[in-house]
Amino acid sequence: MLLHLICFLCALTECTGEDRVIQARGHVTAAAGDTVTLGCRFETTDTNSYLFWYKQEISDFPRFMLRRYKSGGGDNAAEFPKNRFDAHVQNASVPVKIQNVQLSDSAVYYCVLRPTVSGNPHSVYKKLLSGAELLFI
């Protein structure tokens, strides 16, 4: 059984100047049980940036998968355990590795760069999703 994982690029209106994320074009095809890595490069001048991965299934909203700090560390959403979904910031990239791929992993995946901001993080996440522009690549 082949699975299709699609990458999207999410460009935030909050990003300024040189801040951006770059994802490879196209589909990733994998068989059940495989391990796949989805790439994401970023450019930012902010040393405290957060880098996020989201998963969006058909007719559903984007779901937060994991967050990594440019300076190291981060967390995963409960439904995306680190033993299957993991990412490490490496220089100017934050590839996500999905192990033991399952049919339920078929979705659109995209990464987001968000510079650190002060204030209520719950309102920041709402603004992040409502202000995002999704571009097919």
Image: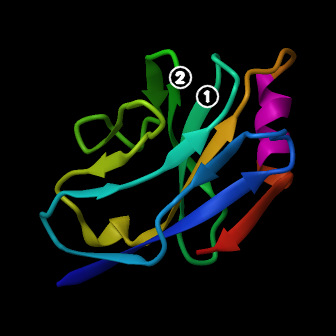
Secondary structure, mark 1, is strand
Looking at the image, which is closer to me, 106 or 39? 39
Residue bounds of the magenta highlight:
121-128
CA–CA distance in space, label 2 to label 1: 5 Å
Compared to residue 72, the image places residue 35 above or below, namely below
Residue 67 in percent (x, y) is at 52, 32
- Residue at the disc numbered 1: 50
Residue 112 in percent (x, y) is at 63, 46
Q: Quadrant of the C terminus?
A: bottom right
- Residue at the disc numbered 2: 69
Residue 52 in percent (x, y) is at 56, 40
Q: Residue at x 57, y 55 (%)?
A: 22
Query: Identity of the amino acid at label 1?
Result: Tyr
Other-residue count near label 2 (Cα within 10 Å), few / some / many at <14 / 14–19 / ≥20: many
Q: Is residue 122 magenta?
A: yes
Q: Quadrant of residue 28?
A: bottom left
Disc 2 + disc 1, Cβ < 8 Å: yes
Q: Quadrant of the N terminus?
A: bottom left
Residue 66 in percent (x, y) is at 48, 37
Sequence-wise, the earlier of marks 2 and 1 is 1
Query: Identity of the amino acid at label 2?
Result: Tyr
Secondary structure, mark 2, is strand
Q: Main secondary structure of the magenta part?
A: helix
Q: Is residue 97 magenta?
A: no
Looking at the image, which is closer to me, 85 or 10? 10
Q: Residue at x 36, y 31 (%)?
A: 88
Given the current orientation, which residue lies at the most extreme bottom position?
1
Q: Is 2 placed left or right of 107 in the picture?
A: left
Given the current orientation, which residue lies at the most extreme left position?
33
